[in-house]
Amino acid sequence: MSTTPQTVRTTDYHTAGEPFRIVDEDLPPIPGDTVAERRTLALRKRGPLDPLRRLLVREPRGHSGMYGGFVVPPDDDGAHFGVLFWHKDGYSTACGHGTMALGAWAVDTGRVHAPDDGDAVVRVDVPSGRVTATVHRAGGRTTGVTFRNVPTRVLARRKPVTTGLGTVEIDLADSGARYASLPAAALGLDTTRDALPALVRAGREIRAALPEHDVYGVILYEDLPDTPAGPHQRNVTVFADGQIDRSPCGSGTSARLALLAEDGRLAPGETLTHQSVAGTVFTGRLLPGGVTEVTGTAHRTGSHTFVLDPHDQLGTGFLL
């Protein structure tokens, strides 16, 4: 065993409160010809990347709600770079808030040129396809990011699911990852912080009840008074195995846009104001062909050099 401490450097952002830890150096060789293939191999083999993922997501260097991405080569010259998204349970197919953070990072670090005033488009290959982050600039700083997702598909409506709080009907949509949506009130809950333990339990139950649909996240939402621009909702998105999205959820917002449009609640040109349990906001709109755009803010929170001491008995850490 090597006696030299392993080091890894990261740049951390948050998008509307949800963390995103970016690693673009100190990476081992990553097999695969495309981003999607690299994710499949990472899931199957739990290869050289996985100890690094565990090191960065687990305590004492991370926490169970940590999210991040490994920057990898793009599928072809049409994108600036690719990314493998990760969380405490593995590797996801899509991440809207992460794409927004990566757009801000690419511009802030000079990886993608941007004007002092105006927009810069950052093209990113993710496991579910090619997405873009349009980075808005004013006075030499980044003021916001608009995430354009892969097309969203509505998969099922009013599918009954039995939970410990009763049988509810959920809607399913695929927006690069698959989400189940339902009103929190259908479970006798709201979307406040006090309700989080019950919302997490319900989200895990619903996801476990839909194994054949490969559901990534469960969106429990609450209607708020409409704005002049369109619908207004607050949500708690429970993703992977019981993680809470601190943001309104980027790809989850895409799912909500498609469902609201199908219900006739989001007309062309209208905007969804989507609020998180932390009070942060994304705005979203639906474009032709099921394409969605979600806008929010992303800010750098720090640059870190993490160390794994080979004599540390905790190794890559733990989760509580």
Image (cartoon, rainbow, N blue to C red):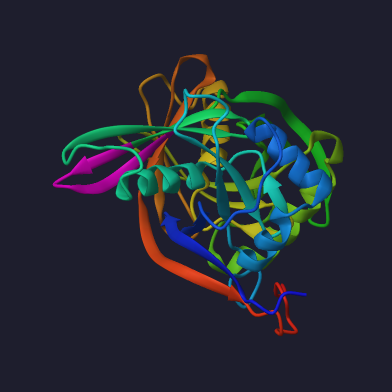
Residue drawn at the location 73% of the way across and 31% of the way down: 158
Task: Give how far across and how far down residue 29 sits, in percent.
Answer: 66, 47
Which of 143 and 218 lies nearest the eye of the viewer?
Answer: 143
Relative to 318, say whether 173 is above or below.
above
Residue drawn at the location 85% of the way across and 41% of the way down: 211
Q: Give the farthest residue toward the top.
A: 289
Residue drawn at the location 71% of the way across and 27% of the way down: 157
Quarter where residue 190 is shown: bottom right
Q: Is residue 22 left or right of residue 320?
A: left
Task: Give how far across and how far down residue 227 sits, in percent.
Answer: 34, 39
Task: Give how far across and how far down residue 180 sits, in percent.
Answer: 69, 39
Quarter where residue 271 is shown: top left
Which of 41 and 143 lies nearest the eye of the viewer?
Answer: 41
Of the 4 image quadrants, the one containing the C terminus is bottom right
The reply to whether residue 167 is visible in this rendering is no
Which of 318 and 96 lies nearest the eye of the viewer?
Answer: 318
Instruction: Give the residues drawn in magenta, as a range.
Output: 135-149
Residue drawn at the location 77% of the way across and 52% of the way down: 47
The reply to whether residue 116 is visible in this rendering is yes
Please say whether residue 113 is one of the residues in the magenta stretch.
no
Q: Give the farthest residue toward the left.
A: 139
Q: Is residue 88 left or right of residue 96?
A: right
Predominant SS of the magenta segment = strand
Please say whether residue 146 is one of the residues in the magenta stretch.
yes
Relative to 141, say whether 317 is above or below.
below
Task: Give how far across and how far down residue 14 sits, in percent.
Answer: 43, 58
Q: How many marks?
A: 0
Of the 4 image quadrants, the one containing the N terminus is bottom right
